[in-house]
Amino acid sequence: MCGVGSLVYDSEGVAEIKPSACRAWSCETCAPVRQAVCAIRARQGRPNKFFTLTSNPKVGASPLERRKIMGEAFPELMKRWEKKTGKKPEYNVFVEETKNGEPHFHVLMRAEYVHWVWLSKWWRELTGAKVVDIRAVKGARGAARYISKYLGKGLHKFGTYKRYWRSRGWLLPPEDDGQGESWAPKPYRWTRDSIDHVVLSYRVAGWWRVPGVSRDGTIHLLWRLSRPPLPPRPPRK
């Protein structure tokens, strides 16, 4: 159920608390948020290439089986890319369903260039499909338009396979914060307690409310330790 429980991030002197969500793509509340987060994470990787991979309708018995073949072939394709260029490619993959119901991979990449002839050859060997497309990203606006185009269509889930995924090194720190390689996303923990109960427990422990807004515009409740804990109430007589 959407809105059940809370998400909490604890750090030294500061805690961020926000309501939990179901995160389902079918949810009218959560789906637009997930699309916005996907767009933010995609831009945060600062891609330099657009890469499209297709399937071959003559291979496999169904689109679901072809999605399975593509998903298993993609890591091997990235290994060949790394061997060819000498540098590990970073990527963010989005899965689209075509008008004919076939799976397509739209990939944002931060990688060294490989000629499409090699990519087509490798992909045909791995999946039986030879149609690929690779283009350079024309600035941040070009990346934003590309991301919005495919996210706006809605990412498709074939069976239990993922709608999107990214490499571990895809996310980069903001260019102006100077954190370099030490930057990492915040690890939130989930609790069944409502946000009111979590807030109350922090207040009793001596934390004080400070309003704040995150980078992507989502409102958070920030709590900073600023006074000693409240004394326990005397027992009732």
Image (cartoon, rainbow, N blue to C red):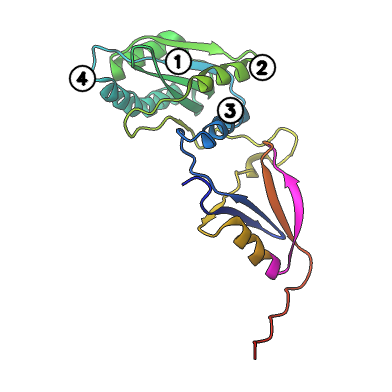
Q: Which residues are magenta?
A: 203-215
- Alpha carbon distance from label 1 to label 2: 19 Å
Left or right of 224? Residue 170 is left
Task: Check the picture and name the quadrant holding the C terminus.
Answer: bottom right
Q: Percent from the top left, x then y, of residue 196?
A: 63, 59
Vertical comparison of 79 with 3: above or below: above
Tell me the amino acid under the disc marked 3: Ala
Viewed as shown, does residue 59 lie left or right of 169?
Answer: left
Q: Amino acid at mark 1?
A: Thr
Look at mark 2 in the image and give the residue it sits on: 141
Residue 205 colored in magenta in the image: yes
Whole-angstrom CA distance, mark 4 to mark 1, is 22 Å
Sequence-first tag of 3 and 2:
3
Whether residues under marks 1 and 2 lie with C-beta atoms below 8 angstroms apart, the answer is no
Q: How far, Cα to Cα, is label 4 from label 3?
A: 33 Å
Q: Secondary structure at mark 2?
A: helix
Image quarter of residue 41: top right
Residue 236 circle label:
none
Residue under label 4, please give it.
61
Residue located beneath label 1 in the image? 52
Task: Answer with mark 4 or mark 1, whichever residue precedes in sequence.
Answer: 1
Q: Does residue 134 appear left or right of residue 180 in this picture?
A: left
Residue occupied by mark 3? 39
